[in-house]
Image (tube, helix red, strand yellow):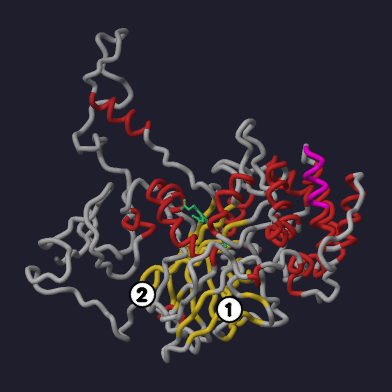
Amino acid sequence: GSPETVTPTGAPTGAPPESKAQQGEYLTTAQGARLRSTDHALKAGPRGPVLLQDHHLREKITHFDHERIPERVVHARGTGAHGVFVANGRAEKICRAAFLKKGVETDVFVRFSTVAGFRGSSDTVRDTRGFATKFYTSEGNYDLVGNNIPVFFIQEGIKFPDIVHAVKPEPDREIPQAQSAHDTFWDFVSLHTEAQAHVAWSMSDRAIPLSYRMMEGFGIHTFRLINEAGETSLVKFHWKPKQGIHSQVWEETQMTAGNDPDFHRRDLYDAIDAGAFPSYDLGVQVMPDSDDETFEGIDLLDPTKIVPEELCPVEIIGTMTLNRRPTNFFAEVEQVMFNPGNLVPGIDITNDPLLQVRLFSYIDTQITRLGGPNFSQIPINRAHCPVNDMFRDGFHQHAVHGGVAPYRPNSLDGGNPAVADDDSGAFIDVPQRVEGAKVRELSESFDDHFSQATLFVRSLTDVERQHLTRAYVFELGKCYEESIRVRQLQCLANIDADLCAEVAKALGLPAPEPTVPPAADVEPSPALSQIRGTWP
Ligand code: HEM
């Protein structure tokens, strides 16, 4: 068929979202019938009971009763803004994506978030921050769904329910709202030692940013880029804020959380209203696409590992400026959906076992959260280029599809829309060779759980290091179970003996001996220290 997709108003999807103002000369029902009053229900006499036949009352109350949709299962608390991304062309040699060609301007929508708290929780808690960007490119939507911490707690997506159940409020008392201050969190991360690098970042000032305008973003996984010649490279994505990188100090977070739980949201919108548009450079670390997918001994498929910038510098490929806040928070910030599988020609995935599972999870959860499979038609999620999918029907179908029926091959509907199986601008799945026995195992190259935590801890300046130590002491001090504190101290002994000794002393516990060979040869990476950048 010819499933051209149109919106209820007849505009093709891809047109900029229409805004439906709730205004007019008179008030009507949802069906357009003019109303006499919306302040009084229909009653049997002015002092009598309300009548069931009041269809306007029932329409009004019923709609209100269903105003809420489920919040995100993670990253529920968020804030978004519109902007524009301008490419500088330096990615052209490694990537064929149209939006990365020199001078191309692309509309974007960004959602910043905390991970653990509910939708109404406080902005300045200690937590990882989400940094998710939707690029409305001429070749379809591209989502870069990242965080402000470049490593992740787990190596395999199958463990995501475990880490999230450990992080979220405990089921009996539903506390705490923050990520780290409780037994189940420390229990999980001390048993599950691949989490230790992310934990070290979480205990650092990185997890209490001063502003969304002043934090970095990371794609974390390694992605595979394809250029015009069909050559591939492996890359990691970085967002670098032009405002510099700044954090609050812990005591300050306590004050802002109390005085203004919306601190980060207000900061972002006040800056945009004042015309001080925040901007961020997008950069890539480019590594050769080798058979073993490693770089300088680091397994590029392991999402608990970074590649230090000293080993592979970040090359800037464009700049994003956030210049418009949402008109309607629900329509834009709550209804936006991101998906690491929303890719454009020139950007492909790798076999990172965390990324592979994310590709399934986002669509699946959004079918529940956004009430069915048609969430791509919600204005904030629509592509800004023509859409010609073969989907039909489903909950909340807003398009009026023409033609006989969407199937291929099809001789009844004036031919088939072209499917580009050649080089004509379609998405490219890199024909990467795959072989191996079917096993529930992970490569041995993922086994090192401590050296990157050591790298991070040793890269901090003295004051950052003091903050880190105090954070471990404070957060572990909230554990009820001593055995969990002892087990986490064992992890710290494996990361850095001095850090372990300081935390153990403050907790009144003995400092254990390491159980893995000390990582003496870990060189600090000054680029990991947060104290850099300039004030805006
Ligand atoms: C939501 C980042 C791993 C499942 C999000 C959001 C971000 C994010 C930024 C919020 C998106 C928004 O603002 O709407 C990451 C990063 C990961 C990671 C950087 C690791 C590198 C995972 C994994 C899974 C997962 C492994 C599942 C296996 C989800 C789900 C949501 C979510 C279900 C809610 C989506 C929605 O309701 O729209 N993630 N995530 N994430 N993530 Fe992840």
Screen quadrant of the C terminus? bottom right
Mark 1 = which residue? Answer: 284
| Horizontal side of residue 533 vs 458, given as left or right | left
Whether residue 25 is in magenta: the answer is no
Q: Does residue 30 sit above or below 346 in this rendering?
A: above
Residue 9 or 496: which is nearer the viewer?
Answer: 496
Q: Is residue 464 visible?
A: no
Picture coordinates of residue 397 (x, y %)?
Answer: 25, 51
Residue 535, labelled with which disc? Answer: none
Residue 459 or 16: which is nearer the viewer?
Answer: 459
- In the figure, residue 383 lies in which quadrant? bottom left
| Horizontal side of residue 361 vs 502, given as left or right | left
Mark 2 = which residue? Answer: 138
Within 10 Å of the Cα at label 1, are there few (<14), some (14-19), or many (20+) other Cα atoms? many
Q: CA distance from mark 1 to mark 2?
A: 21 Å
Residue range (magenta): 481-489
